[in-house]
Structures are given as structure tokens and as C-alpha cells.
Image: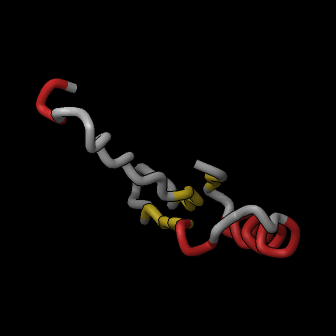
């Protein structure tokens, strides 16, 4: 996870700042989630990067890992 907040304006500002300054982020792998709040839980905004599970080594039997 890169960033999480319950402040929507802080969320937008952080994403704008990252897009403008961080050239190492591959934005095709970024996930932006909004967890909608209810009466008890506030809305939460989360920015994370997808990290795929590595493919099993072709020389190993995956059942033994």
C-alpha cells in the first residue's frame, strides 16, 4: 500500500503530487480503492500497487512448494 486516508482532499492532493513527481510508479499497476463509509465506519481512500504472484519455476514441481 502506498497511501491511505479518510480525508478526501488529502487523497486527491497526494495522488496529484505522486503523478507529478514520482516517475518510477507504473500507473498501469496502481489500484485506487474507495471503501464507502457507513454510520460507524468513515469512508477510506487507499492507493496501492498490484504485485503479481511470481510464476512457479519451470524446473520445480509446484506441488512440493
Number of numbered markers:
0
**In the displayed structure image, the side of residue 18 where residue 51 appears, left or right:** left
Q: Quadrant of residue 16?
A: bottom right
In percent of width and height, residue 53 lies at 36, 47
Q: Nearer the viewer, residue 7 or 59?
A: 59
Query: Where's residue 39, x and y in %?
Result: 40, 57
**Which color scheme is applied?**
secondary structure
Which of the pair 40/26 is nearer the observer? 26
Residue at the spot x=15%, y=24% of the render?
Answer: 64
At a point 61% along the width and 56% down the height, the residue shown is 6
Q: Residue at x 44, y 51 (%)?
A: 41
Quadrant housing the C terminus: top left
Q: Is residue 20 left or right of residue 29?
A: right
Residue 34 drawn above or below residue 42: below
Quarter occupied by residue 27: bottom right
Q: Residue furthest front?
A: 59
Residue sitting at 51 percent across and 66 percent down?
31
Q: Residue furthest right?
A: 21
Q: Residue pushed farthest top?
A: 64
Q: Left or right: where does residue 24 sit relative to residue 63? A: right
Q: Position of residue 63 (x, y in %)?
A: 12, 31
Indicate the position of residue 47 as horizontal and vertical percent values: 59, 60
Answer above or below: position of 36 versus 56: below
Q: Is residue 31 left or right of residue 64?
A: right
Q: Nearer the viewer, residue 14 or 28?
A: 28
Residue in the foreground of this view, choosing between 44 and 59: 59
Amino acid at each position: 500500500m502506498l497511501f491511505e486516508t479518510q480525508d478526501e482532499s488529502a487523497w486527491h492532493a497526494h495522488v496529484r503530487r505522486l503523478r507529478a513527481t514520482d516517475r518510477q510508479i507504473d500507473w498501469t499497476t496502481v489500484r485506487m480503492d474507495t471503501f464507502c463509509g457507513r454510520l460507524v465506519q468513515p469512508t477510506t481512500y487507499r492507493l496501492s500497487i498490484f504485485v503479481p504472484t511470481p510464476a512457479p519455476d519451470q524446473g520445480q514441481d509446484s506441488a512440493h512448494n
